[in-house]
């Protein structure tokens, strides 16, 4: 699996690159906003050029338009301006730019992807929330699809009445255990006193199954499951679009999308840091250093 860092912070990109594990970078308008906030009088063009130079691998830069013509023109501009720097620009295009106010952008992402594919501009289709969207993007000729695993988990948890920031922190792991989550939907009295075989019966309880369906996102219960489903679909039809797991919130989720066969994971810097940590590793380092005998130390002198 390739590892991209999901950040527009140049220091984070350079640091992750220095570890020897970095294959690329993804940015988006929110990440750029965060980076700009920390700086005064930033020259955006120079700053993006610096990002492109910092890694020898794809750098995703996102368009901001909402219709095909705007998005294609912006993609061409991003590509012409920044690809010459290190030959590594990939343009991020949202799968669907409709909003609660208008559905006008519903198919514009797809159309833009198709146009950019025929122009030879590589694309990363962003804001993928379900496998069907990924299939359409692949058919339109995109190079990468980015399922937003963490946001899908948020959506499922929202369906059971949990709110991020109030009921759980952004980094919390979601295991898709719908029975446990169902308890939040006041189903608890139906099964809280059950045990053993009686408890197993809950899986056949009509009420519980109704709730189970209402919690799911078209039959899917976790972001990692979306990644796994897209991966299966692309393998079935030998589609060569890469699955780029995005919106990853913790080390366990990275492991799950890797198990699901993601071609790439784009990982926030703090999650990359979390991936290396383990208490027992630290303890092991201490134990080994305590056990070094002078005879062994001698061979290093
Ligand atoms: O790669 C997409 C990512 O930046 C979105 O992450 O945590 O805001 O859902 P998040």
Image (cartoon, rainbow, N blue to C red):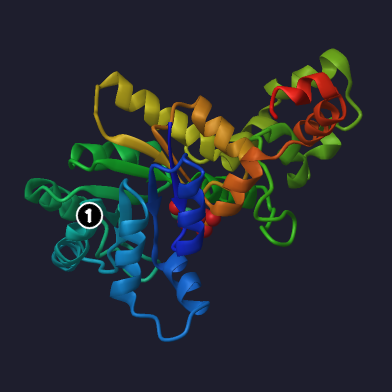
Q: Residue lying at the far right in this picture: please name it.
A: 193
Looking at the image, residue 288 sits to the left or right of residue 29; the answer is right
Name the foreground residue: 298 vs 22: 298
Asked where in the image residue 282 lies, by quadrant, the reply is top right
* Vertical arrangement, residue 198 with respect to residue 58, above or below: above
Which residue is at a point 14% across and 52% down the rendered structure image?
A: 116
For label 1, count other residues whose C-alpha is less than 10 Å away and answer few (under 14), some (14-19) or many (20+).
some
Dot 1 falls on a residue whose secondary structure is loop
Q: Residue lying at the far left in this picture: please name it.
A: 118
Residue 207 in view (yes/no): no
Q: Residue lying at the far top in this picture: please name it.
A: 197
Which residue is at a point 69% across and 27% down the rendered structure image?
A: 300
Looking at the image, residue 49 sits to the left or right of residue 77; the answer is right
Which residue is at a point 51% across and 54% down the rendered structure image?
A: 15
Name the foreground residue: 157 vs 275: 275
Relative image position of residue 115 (x, y in whole percent): 11, 52
Name the foreground residue: 213 vs 97: 97
Q: Is mark 1 within 8 Å of ligand 1?
A: no
Which residue is at a point 52% across and 40% down the rendered structure image?
A: 223
Relative image position of residue 148 (x, y in whole percent): 46, 47
Q: How many marks?
A: 1
The residue wearing badge 1 is 107
Quarter of the image with the N terminus is top left
Looking at the image, residue 189 sits to the left or right of residue 92; the answer is right
């Amino acid at each position: 699996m390739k590892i991209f860092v999901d950040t527009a912070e140049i220091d984070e990109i350079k640091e992750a690159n220095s570890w020897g594990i970095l294959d690329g970078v993804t940015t988006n308008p929110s990440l750029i906003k965060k980076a700009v906030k920390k700086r005064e009088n930033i020259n955006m063009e120079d700053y993006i050029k610096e990002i492109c130079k910092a890694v020898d691998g794809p750098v995703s830069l996102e368009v901001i338009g909402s219709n095909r013509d705007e998005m294609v023109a912006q993609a061409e501009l991003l590509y012409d301006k920044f690809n010459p720097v290190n030959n590594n620009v990939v343009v991020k295009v949202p799968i669907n730019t409709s909003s609660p106010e208008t559905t006008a952008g519903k198919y514009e992402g797809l159309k833009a992807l198709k146009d950019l594919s025929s122009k030879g501009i590589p694309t990363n289709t962003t804001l993928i929330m379900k496998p069907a969207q990924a299939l359409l993007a692949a058919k339109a000729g995109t190079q990468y699809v980015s399922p937003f695993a963490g946001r899908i988990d948020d959506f499922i948890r929202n369906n059971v009445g949990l709110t991020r920031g109030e009921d759980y922190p952004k980094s919390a792991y979601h295991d898709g255990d719908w029975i446990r989550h169902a308890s939040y939907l006041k189903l608890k009295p139906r099964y809280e006193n059950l045990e053993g075989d009686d408890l197993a019966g809950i899986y056949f309880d009509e009420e519980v199954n109704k709730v189970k369906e209402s919690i799911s996102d078209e039959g899917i219960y976790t972001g990692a499951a979306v990644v796994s489903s897209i991966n299966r679909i692309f393998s079935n039809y030998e589609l060569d679009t890469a699955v780029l797991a995005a919106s990853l919130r913790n080390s366990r989720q990275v492991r799950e999308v890797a198990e699901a066969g993601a071609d790439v994971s784009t990982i926030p810097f703090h999650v990359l840091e979390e991936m290396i940590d383990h208490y027992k590793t630290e303890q092991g380092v201490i134990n080994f250093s305590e056990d070094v005998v002078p005879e062994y130390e001698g061979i290093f002198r």
